[in-house]
Image (tube, rainbow, N blue to C red):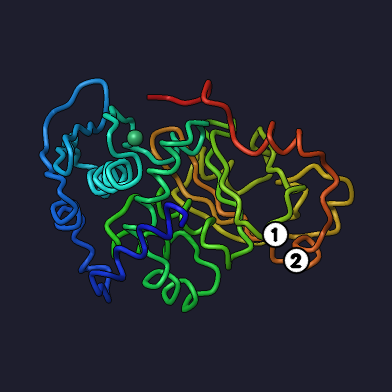
């Protein structure tokens, strides 16, 4: 079972039928993990355990969803990596998305599925079609997660033709691509002046609309296509973007890059992470 499947099977075992019932501390307690909150320095969460009892210490945060994601992350370690101790940077799941540390990615995947299980999220996504940021905000509130965590989850839910990305200033910080989006589509590493995201970064809060695909991609022949762009301000200096590949031909286009290119361009390296 994948980390996500493990988390969702736990949610199913508890018979959860609504996001309000996702009591993450109760899940942890049931698994033998005590959750305490503290003013940790230098990390966001720690996990120590002995046999079947453990303690997850979570840094206090007033940012919506952050503590819950940290608890879900430590639960992931507890369920999948028992016997090890951890000091984690999990206040923003995108930090681990940009890293190549397998255990941290697995713990994030576990947390994302525990907090936003597919059976509860999918009906909401389907009811709106292609979520814009007003929907992302609504979903994040209902599931008590950060907006960043929700954007990444939407890109991984595998029914939307979407690429989620975050730019810090005009530089690409991370990107999460839906599994069905052809690997040839790499968003530009520098934000295009003609994108809505560029305007949002300079002046606004959020914006959405059809855009020529060449604003986002520099592939040959891309000028034939249009995409739907939704952009909103993220954390200080950041803009979050959802790019929907609304043209069916973009979704069926064959890859014209090598696997080495995919590894190089799929995620930003850890050097670009900010703590
Ligand atoms: Zn961790």
Please determine whether, in this image, residue 271 is positioned above or below residue 185. above
Q: Earlier in the sequence, mark 2 or mark 1?
A: 1
Name the spot of residue 253 as percent of width and height, x first: 82, 58
Name the spot of residue 73 as percent of width and height, x first: 31, 43
| Ligand 1 quarter of the rendering | top left
- Number of marks: 2
Q: Left or right: where does residue 55 sit relative to residue 82?
A: left
Please determine whether, in this image, residue 168 is positioned above or below residue 20. above
Q: Is mark 2 on a helix, strand or loop?
A: loop
The answer to which image quadrant residue 7 occupies is bottom left
Please determine whether, in this image, residue 213 is positioned above or below residue 38. below
Q: Which of 13 and 16 is in front in this view?
A: 13
Q: Which residue is drawn at 54% across and 74% down?
A: 129
Q: Which residue is drawn at 27% across and 26% down?
A: 43
Q: Residue at x 50, y 66 (%)?
A: 131
Q: Left or right: where does residue 183 sit relative to residue 198?
A: right
Name the spot of residue 200 as percent of width and height, x first: 52, 45
Q: Residue 181 carries which label?
A: none
User: Mark 1 Cα within 10 Å, few/some/many (few <14, many 20+)?
Assistant: many
Q: Is mark 1 on a helix, strand or loop?
A: strand
Residue reaching furthest right?
221
Q: Left or right: where does residue 225 sit relative to residue 57?
A: right
Q: Quadrant of the C terminus?
A: top left
Q: Name the residue beneath numbered marker 1.
A: 227
Q: Residue 247 carries which label?
A: 2
Name the spot of residue 116 as percent of width and height, x first: 36, 61
Q: Residue at x 42, y 49 (%)?
A: 109
Q: Which of 191 and 85 is in front in this view?
A: 85
Confirm if mark 1 falls within 8 A of ligand 1.
no
The answer to which image quadrant residue 170 occupies is top right
Residue reaching furthest front?
51
Q: Do the residues labelled 2 and 1 touch (CB within 8 Å)?
A: yes
């Amino acid at each position: 079972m994948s980390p996500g499947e493990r988390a969702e099977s736990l949610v199913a075992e508890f018979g959860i039928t609504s996001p309000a019932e996702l009591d993450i501390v109760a899940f942890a307690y049931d698994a033998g993990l005590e959750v305490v909150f503290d003013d940790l320095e230098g990390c966001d969460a720690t996990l120590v355990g002995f046999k079947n009892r453990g303690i997850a210490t979570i840094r206090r945060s007033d940012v919506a969803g952050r503590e819950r994601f940290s608890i879900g992350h430590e639960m992931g370690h507890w369920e999948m990596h028992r016997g090890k101790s951890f000091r984690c940077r999990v206040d923003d799941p995108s930090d681990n998305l940009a890293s190549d540390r397998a255990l941290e990615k697995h713990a994030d995947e576990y947390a994302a599925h525990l907090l936003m299980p597919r059976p509860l999220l999918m009906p909401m996504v389907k009811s709106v079609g292609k979520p814009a940021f007003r929907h992302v905000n609504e979903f994040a509130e209902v599931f008590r997660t950060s907006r960043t965590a929700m954007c990444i989850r939407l890109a991984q839910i595998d029914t939307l033709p979407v690429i989620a990305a975050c730019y810090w200033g005009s530089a690409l910080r991370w990107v999460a691509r839906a599994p069905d989006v052809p690997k040839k589509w790499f968003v530009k590493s520098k934000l295009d002046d003609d994108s809505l995201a560029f305007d949002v970064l300079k002046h606004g809060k959020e914006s959405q609309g059809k855009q020529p695909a060449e604003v986002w991609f520099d592939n040959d022949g891309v000028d034939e296509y249009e995409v739907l762009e939704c952009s909103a301000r993220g954390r200080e200096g950041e803009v979050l973007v959802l790019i929907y590949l609304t043209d069916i031909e973009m979704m069926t286009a064959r890859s014209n890059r090598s696997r080495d290119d995919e590894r190089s361009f799929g995620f930003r390296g850890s050097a670009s992470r900010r703590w």
